[in-house]
Structure formats: structure tokens, C-alpha cells
Image (cartoon, rainbow, N blue to C red):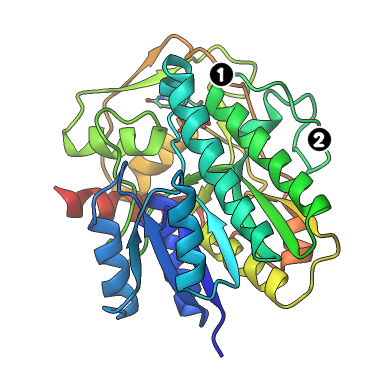
């Protein structure tokens, strides 16, 4: 019997890529989404890529406890991957209650249903934001978490703690938190990718929108950081590589390979790339010139962060494979398709 994975937020950027990889690895998937921050483009793309026109989609809000309970009764769920959450850092500062209400309540409901049914495997999508401005680089899973600088970051830390405490308290509840570094790119089919609403906050969507003419000019936020070229350094991880890490983590849970009932893994490449290096790589691989200028630092940005991914490499048997050039070519192919 195929194992069934519930993917909350499965119609979004990361969720849609994970759904494709799960199906290709032989899992049954139930996608659940309230479409609050996406349309059905990616869900339709997932169906095309996988040839699964019958892929189950449940339109629902994870803040509705009854709806979550019903979902787990309607389907036999072996594992749940929880993506359903708001993700804009700036908006979370402007409207913290929106973030606390949605991001915390939805995950509490997942955990409560897992408890009620006597256990479940729960994978939480966390973020490198929990490390704040690290003192030592690269960061390992043992690196200290820093006080969150935004309500969004705070919800990631709090949800990690909810999962840890529920695993400790409720028999049969197991959990993995994956701390993502900077997910970028798109599926090589160009059928699914990132669909930012309004002006993009993130670097790569801003780059591709500038290249295609939707934006006049990219602002590089700060060129006076204490880094080799003065711009911030990040660990940009290909979205398909990132999605594959979820398949490895789900298999680890379902195959009884976990060494602790709650585990944390960094999902990154281990390779720092500066903003300027990323822009140059984008120009080179796609053979175009990008209009950009240097602008003041963006409040809240850390100078540099990249992963030590060796724990995930060893325990999950996973490794980032695509080069940043391949990833940027895929991001550009996706943007051109959207035009
Ligand atoms: N960045 C930039 N211009 C933009 C958007 C982002 O220079 O229009 C920089 C930002 O300052 C950071 C890096 O790109 O150094 C990655 O930012 P992003 O928002 O994509 O991810 P974050 O690391 O903040 O989660």
C-alpha cells in the first residue's frame, strides 16, 4: 500500500514542488490549501508534470480545527508536511496578529489532530531565520537560535517549539523540522514556480521581473557589508533540491529510521553567494544585462548566513545537486513563461 502524505499549503511555491517529488517517489499525496496567497497555476502545473489529473485537492483553512479533524478522518494520513503559513517578513511587522493568528493556530490544529488520533509523522517547514545574525559560520543545527527580529521569524521558532514539546508529550507523534536557507528557482518544466503577489520582497523574483521589464531596476540593498564584495551573502538552495530533502525526511519518518522522535536538519548547499555574485551569475547564464543600482541597507537583513548541511547529507542521504547557474536559468525560464 502506498503511504499517503498530506501537504498543507500544497498549491504554493514550495508545496507544489514537494508534491511533485513525493508523487515521483511513489507516495500518494493529498494537497490542502486555502488559496489565500496563490491561485491554481501551480496545482494545475503539478497535475501536468505528474500526469495525475485525479490528484486530491481539499480547499480548506488549517485554522479551522473541525476542517482539519475531518480531513484526517476522510483520508488515512501517514505523514503531514505543514507549509500553510504567511511568509512576508515586512507584513508580519506591520500586522503581527495576522501572522500569530494564522501561522500558530494552523499548526496547533495539525498537532492537536495528530495527538487526538494517537500519533502522526509531522514535518514542519522552518527557516534559517531562526539563527538570526550568526556569530559563527557556517551554521549547524547546534548553532544558537537568536531572538527573532520579526513576528514571522517568531512564528517559525514558536512552531519548532510546539513540535518539540508535542513530540515529547504525546505518544506516536514524531517530528522533523527542516530549516531552509534561501529557496530559489523553479521546476525544469517551467510549469510551476514562484508567483509573488505585488512587488516581490525576495531577490530572485525581483531579478527575473526586472529582466523581463516588469520592474525598472533592481536595488541591491547595501554594498558596505563586511563581506568580500560588500553585499550580503546567503545560501541559495534550488527549489527542486529542497523538495527532494522533504522526500528523504518523509522516508526517514515512515521507514522508522529516526534516531530521535524530534529532529532538525539544515537544508542548504553550504555555499555562500553574495547578492552581486548572484546577479552576475544570472546575467551570464541567461546572456543578458540587468539594470541594477546600489541602495541603502534593508532594515533587518543579516550580513551573511550559510548552512553546514552535513547532518542532512549524512542522515537524510540528501545533498544539494544543482548549480546556482542551473537554478537561475530555471527561474528565468519560469518568468518568461508567465509573460
Ligand atoms: N535583496 C536585494 N534586493 C532586493 C531583494 C533582496 O538586494 O530587491 C537582498 C537582501 O538584502 C538579502 C538578499 O538579497 O541580502 C536575499 O534577500 P531575500 O529577501 O531574497 O531573502 P532573505 O535572506 O532576506 O530571507
Instruction: Give left or right: position of 331 versus 153.
Output: left
Answer with mark 2 or mark 1, whichever residue precedes in sequence.
2
> Residue, x 24% and y 65% (percent of image)?
44
Q: Secondary structure at mark 1?
A: loop
Viewer-closest of 170 and 15: 170
> Where does the image place residue 246, in percent across and percent down from the top left?
58, 62
- What residue is pinned by disc 1? 230
Q: Is ligand 1 less than 8 Å from the beta carbon at label 1?
A: no
Instruction: Say above or below: 291 vs 74.
Output: above
> Where does the image place residue 267, in percent across and percent down from the top left?
64, 51
State which quarter of the image contains the N terminus.
bottom right
> Where does the image place residue 290, in percent across and percent down from the top left?
28, 32
Instruction: Give left or right: position of 188 versus 277.
Output: left
Viewer-closest of 118 and 259: 118
Q: How many numbered badges does the structure rendering display?
A: 2
List the single residue furthest toward the bottom: 1
Q: Secondary structure at mark 2?
A: loop
> Residue, x 75% and y 30% (percent of image)?
145
Which of the 4 quarters of the picture holds residue 216?
Answer: top left
- Give me the C-alpha separation between circle 2 and circle 1: 25 Å
- What residue is pinned by disc 2? 143
Q: Is ligand 1 less than 8 Å from the beta carbon at label 2?
A: no
Tag on residue 162? none
Viewer-closest of 187 and 196: 196
Instruction: Give left or right: position of 273 versus 23.
Output: right
> Residue, x 67% and y 47% (percent of image)?
270
Amino acid at each position: 500500500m502506498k503511504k499517503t502524505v498530506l501537504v498543507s499549503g500544497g498549491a504554493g511555491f514550495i508545496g507544489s514542488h514537494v508534491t511533485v517529488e513525493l508523487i515521483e517517489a511513489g507516495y500518494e499525496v493529498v494537497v490542502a490549501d486555502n488559496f489565500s496567497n496563490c491561485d491554481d497555476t501551480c496545482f494545475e502545473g503539478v497535475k501536468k508534470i505528474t500526469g495525475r489529473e485525479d490528484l486530491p485537492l481539499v480547499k480548506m483553512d488549517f485554522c479551522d480545527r473541525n476542517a482539519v479533524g475531518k480531513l484526517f478522518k476522510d483520508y488515512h494520513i501517514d505523514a503531514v508536511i505543514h507549509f500553510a503559513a504567511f511568509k512576508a517578513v515586512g507584513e508580519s511587522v506591520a500586522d503581527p496578529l495576522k501572522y500569530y493568528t494564522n501561522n500558530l493556530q494552523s499548526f496547533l490544529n495539525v498537532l492537536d489532530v495528530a495527538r487526538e488520533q494517537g500519533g502522526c509523522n509531522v514535518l514542519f517547514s522552518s527557516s534559517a531565520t531562526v539563527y538570526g545574525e550568526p556569530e559563527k559560520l557556517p551554521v549547524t543545527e547546534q548553532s544558537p537560535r537568536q531572538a527573532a527580529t520579526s513576528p514571522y521569524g517568531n512564528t517559525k521558532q514558536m512552531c519548532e517549539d510546539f513540535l518539540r514539546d508535542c513530540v515529547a508529550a504525546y505518544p506516536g507523534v514524531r517530528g522533523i523540522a527542516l530549516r531552509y536557507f534561501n529557496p530559489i528557482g523553479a521546476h525544469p518544466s517551467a510549469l510551476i514556480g514562484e508567483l509573488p503577489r505585488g512587488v516581490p520582497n525576495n531577490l530572485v523574483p525581483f531579478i527575473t521581473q526586472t529582466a523581463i521589464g516588469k520592474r525598472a531596476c533592481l536595488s541591491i540593498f547595501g554594498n558596505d557589508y563586511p563581506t568580500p564584495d560588500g553585499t550580503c551573502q546567503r545560501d541559495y538552495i534550488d527549489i527542486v533540491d529542497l523538495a527532494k530533502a522533504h522526500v528523504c525526511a518523509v522516508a526517514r519518518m515512515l521507514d522508522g529510521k529516526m534516531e530521535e522522535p524530534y529532529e532538525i536538519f539544515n537544508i542548504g548547499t553550504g555555499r555562500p553567494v553574495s547578492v552581486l555574485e548572484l546577479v552576475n551569475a544570472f546575467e551570464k547564464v541567461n546572456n543578458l544585462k540587468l539594470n541594477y543600482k546600489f541602495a541603502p541597507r534593508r532594515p533587518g537583513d543579516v550580513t551573511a548566513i550559510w548552512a553546514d548541511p552535513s547532518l542532512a547529507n549524512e542522515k537524510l542521504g540528501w545533498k544539494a545537486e544543482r548549480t546556482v547557474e542551473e537554478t537561475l536559468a530555471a527561474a528565468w525560464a519560469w518568468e518568461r513563461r508567465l509573460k
